Amino acid sequence: MSRALTDLCDVPIVQAPMAGGGSCPPLAAAVSDAGGLGFLAAGYKTADGMYQEITQLRALTSRPFGVNLFLPQPELADPATIEVYRHQLAGEAAWYETPLGDSDLGQDDNWDAKLAILLDDPVPLVSFTFGCPTAEVVDSFHRVGTRTVVTVTTPEEARAAEEAGADALCVQGIEAGGHQGTHRDDPERDGAGFGLLTLLTLVREAVHLPMIAAGGIMRGEQIAAAVAAGAQAAQLGTAFLVCPESGAPLLHKQALGNPLFTRTELTRAFSGRPARGLVNRFLREHGPYAPAAYPQVHHVTSPLRKAAARTGDAQGMALWAGQGHRLAREMPAAQLVEVLAAETAAAVLALGGPSSPGGTR
């Protein structure tokens, strides 16, 4: 692994920051203690909420960990399209007996306050999603000893991250569960993203930064394949979602293996930005009409999703999942890290890697 990652984890396994509850201090601590790199998701939290989770995590482990931030979003959404979508969701509000959320709750996800906390009380690693921070922001983290990772989905985004001075990239293929971390939300490119192995090659030939591979990875053999394609580590989200330490709702965990949910799709139905989830009633009925309006749509649908979870209705929840969700294994996070590391080592050995007697590297 690159020096940007070697002293942060012993094995090339990163637990994805899953905003909305999946990532939590117990999960991140278990992964880090097992030799991987645990992550907290600051997205959708208040600055104080983020700080409290960091405090809890530090009480659970002395190992390195990361915190993920969402970049502030530009005011691009047409208010008229949001209002039309609100009317479309009126039946959902009546069904769940809950009002729709306020679409005007802000675009910046408490960015400035979170930066202030992380610069005042530094963590080992900060990653960024939905854009690239300025060189000034990256420099400010470097001055306090924090390493930086930018999520990218194209070679052009990778070049922007390199120019900003990022230490590494999280290269996200279209197979990934949850939100696509595109820097610019372009509806004309919905579903046009690169598969992970192709993207790794494109990015590797465009920039000279360490890469963390993300997108549908569930087995050690896939980690080995990503490493063979140039990545230094792999980031897994859905694989850790079913662990007992995960903060995901039980309904969400159960849905990953439920034969009722046969496939995943990218949708704007829940948040206004493309995100991959299990196809359920809400996604089918509202996905075709959801506008490109993030985070406004997220705020509007939030009460509906919470009400669906309270009433045990998985058909109304955002069931984020990667394409490999059927490969999820329900086991403690530390055990999963151990199994994945063993699978990876075996796959590398079979390919004639450095630990193989016949290896040449």
Image (cartoon, grey):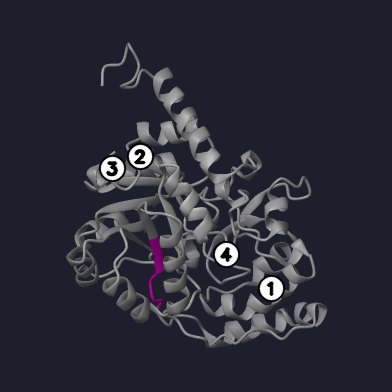
In the image, 247: left or right of 132?
right
Magenta highlight on residue 70: yes
In the image, 351: left or right of 120?
right
> Residues in magenta?
67-73
**Local crowd size for mark 3, using a 10 Å CA cut-off: few (<14), some (14–19), many (≥20):** few
Residue beneath the point at 31% across and 16% down: 359
Mark 1 residue type: Lys
Estimate the spatial distance between the alpha carbons at disc 2 and disc 3, rounded to whole Å: 7 Å
Q: Is residue 344 above or below residue 35?
A: above
Of discs 4 and 1, which sits in the foreground? 4
Q: Is residue 93 above or below residue 50?
A: below
Q: Earlier in the sequence, mark 2 or mark 4?
A: 2
Residue pointed to by mark 3: 6
Estimate the spatial distance between the alpha carbons at disc 4 and disc 1, rounded to whole Å: 12 Å
**Local crowd size for mark 4, using a 10 Å CA cut-off: few (<14), some (14–19), many (≥20):** some
Residue pointed to by mark 4: 21
Magenta highlight on residue 72: yes
Q: Earlier in the sequence, mark 3 or mark 4?
A: 3
Query: Helix, strand, or loop for circle 1?
Result: helix
Q: Are marks 1 and 2 in contact (CB under 8 Å)?
A: no
Asked if residue 43 shows in the view, the reply is yes
Residue pointed to by mark 1: 306
Of discs 1 and 2, which sits in the foreground? 2
Query: Helix, strand, or loop for circle 2?
Result: loop
Estimate the spatial distance between the alpha carbons at disc 2 and disc 4, rounded to whole Å: 26 Å
Query: Helix, strand, or loop for circle 4?
Result: loop
